[in-house]
Amino acid sequence: MRIWSFFIVLFALGVIFPSGPSGALELGQENTGPEIFSAESLSMIEPEVGVENPLLIQVGMTQALETGKMGAHKFYDTPGMKAFYEARGHKVAWLESSFFRARKAETLLKTFENSWTHGLNPNHYHVEEIRRLMREAKGARRYELELLLSDALVRYGRDLTGMRVPPRKIGQKSKYWRQPLRGIDVLQHVAEASSARDALKSMAPQGNLYKKLREELIRLYKTPLDDASMRPVSLKGLIRPGDSHKAVARIRERMGYNSNNASQGAYYYDDNLAQAVMAFQKAHGLKADAIIGPHTVKLMNMTREDRIHQVLVNLERLRWMEPARPERYVIVNVPSATLWAMEGGQVRLEMPVVVGRKKRPTKSFTTTITGIRYNPTWTVPPTIKKEDYLPKLQEDPYYLADRGIELMDGKMSVDPGQIDWANKTWEEVNAMRMVQGSGRTNPLGLVRVIMSNPYNIYLHDTPKKSQFALTNRAFSSGCVRMERALDLADFVLEPNDNWSPERRDAVLTKGKMTDIWAHEPMPVYIVYNTVWLGDRGQVVYGSDLYGHDRILLQALRDIGSVMSVEEQETTVALSDYVIN
């Protein structure tokens, strides 16, 4: 019925059947008048400059939404925008009156202009064109401003609320991560809110890490470009306090010291410099031992752009996480090799873990912890079977037997000495199971967390406790080894009725594999954040263990989301943004 009301009013205005001098169209006369929704027809009935005609704005909006574009701008989600405006009776959302226009339209523009603080590119949100239209668009032509604001909001809401790059391009599966809000949901969320500003803010992650990374990004963008004279440190091996090395002179520069003022020479690693290096190491999550090696040098050599890019990709990953978390959950950050058990927003348990080495990475995914397996047996996974054990068996058929690993063909135990390992195909070898019984020497230790996933990656105990004291803890074949596996098991089973440390110990003493199901299953998030917060709340730049930062950065470049240095300077210079 609404569209018919448009026709009736347009008829009355003479747009559909424009009259001749007598005001009537004679029978048989050709109608050479303008089309219903053409720009010419709008200009014919446009009111005087500065006076808006809501009907004409609606007509312009209807035409643009039918074509799915406006000039050179193609709408990102035309069906979503059409549904939004149809539900509103084609009434404007951002230009309802001079008061709301000043508040809503300008709030949207300011939000798009400041999108760089989220690691986004303001040029994605039509900021230049919206500024121009806010200055120049008059009367009926203001529908262009209305629709550009809506299209920009759809794009902004999508970018801020989920994974926006093709999952396969970055080695991910979309089912594990938050997907962007639909266009109509973004539009309705902001249009129906009593405060557009608060509605826009609520779409971004609200966690402390996200806020801290935004603050760090703002600081970096406002930091002058690196001094060309700041030469990178080149070092092979290690430097300890008291050593003399030509690299020390450049390290002094990086630490803000003047080599000319060194009391024992520019190349001597003295106590004052050692104190500065220790502070630098501590601030960046390294062991503060004043020993300068490859990890310390890599962080020293990071440029402003390196840090900006690292923060960008980590902000991106944080937006993949669902905003609502349950009361209790477990999270593992692979690059920092750390596990946290969370309850009520507080850390109940924190521990170092060992993660997959570069050639056998720990995957990032989310799943549900459904129970704990005590005294687990270990079935050798295909990768270890093929790459580690098969070559050893070809040299020594009893290699596995000497390590307490039984060879099984179906349910039957097989004598490995009776097998011609050199002529066995991989398919034949893979069909055999290699199983190690329960016990403290079992690679899974005394505990394995039951958590379904397609990667055969689990959280588990380990007999190799010495690795937890190391800074680099990437040694496993993909699974996550826990320093305090029994403590995590207690956390998972804490809500179970009649479960206690005494019952746990009784199960362990029996030595038999036993599954205890969790009465309250909880999610576990295995994430890849190469920037995190240290023990004093400081931003820590970690290692890109598997090169995932580089791949994600390129994917963001491919969609034009990474600003050039020139764009950075222009965007930040126009902004007076302060996080609040």
Image (spheres, rainbow, N blue to C red):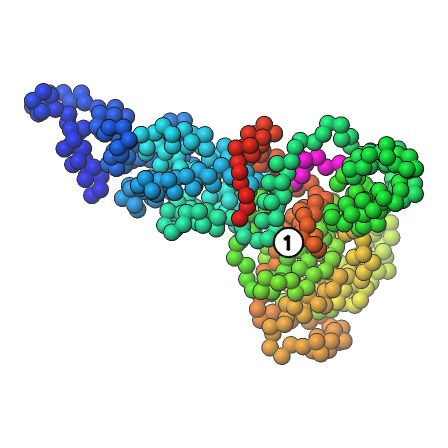
Quadrant containing the N terminus is: top left
Name above or below for residue 323 compared with residue 156. below
Is residue 466 part of the magenta span, yes or no? no
Name above or below for residue 92 compared with residue 132. below
Name the residue located 48 percent from the left edge and 51 percent from the top edge. Answer: 202
190 relative position to 533: left or right: left
* Image coords of residue 107 (percent x, y): 43, 42
The picture quadrant where one finds residue 66 is: top left
* Image coords of residue 481 (percent x, y): 73, 58
458 relative position to 511: left or right: left
The picture quadrant where one finds residue 165 is: top right
Crowding near the residue tagged with mark 1, few <14, some 14–19, many ≥20 C-alpha atoms within 10 Å: some
Near-viewer residue (386 or 123): 123
The answer to whether one can see residue 35 in this image is no
Near-viewer residue (388 or 91): 91
Near-viewer residue (146 or 514): 146
Query: Callout 1: helix, strand or loop?
Result: strand
Name the residue located 61 percent from the left edge and 48 percent from the top edge. Answer: 212
Name the residue located 70 percent from the left edge and 61 percent from the top edge. Answer: 350
Name the residue located 63 percent from the left edge and 51 percent from the top edge. Answer: 527
The answer to whether one can see residue 569 in this image is yes
Segment colored magenta:
301-310
Mark 1 belongs to which amino acid? Answer: Ile
Residue at image mark 1: 526
* Image coords of residue 195 (percent x, y): 40, 50
383 relative position to 347: left or right: right
* Image coords of residue 36 (percent x, y): 22, 29
447 relative position to 3: left or right: right
* Magenta span: chief secondary structure: helix
Near-viewer residue (376 or 163): 163
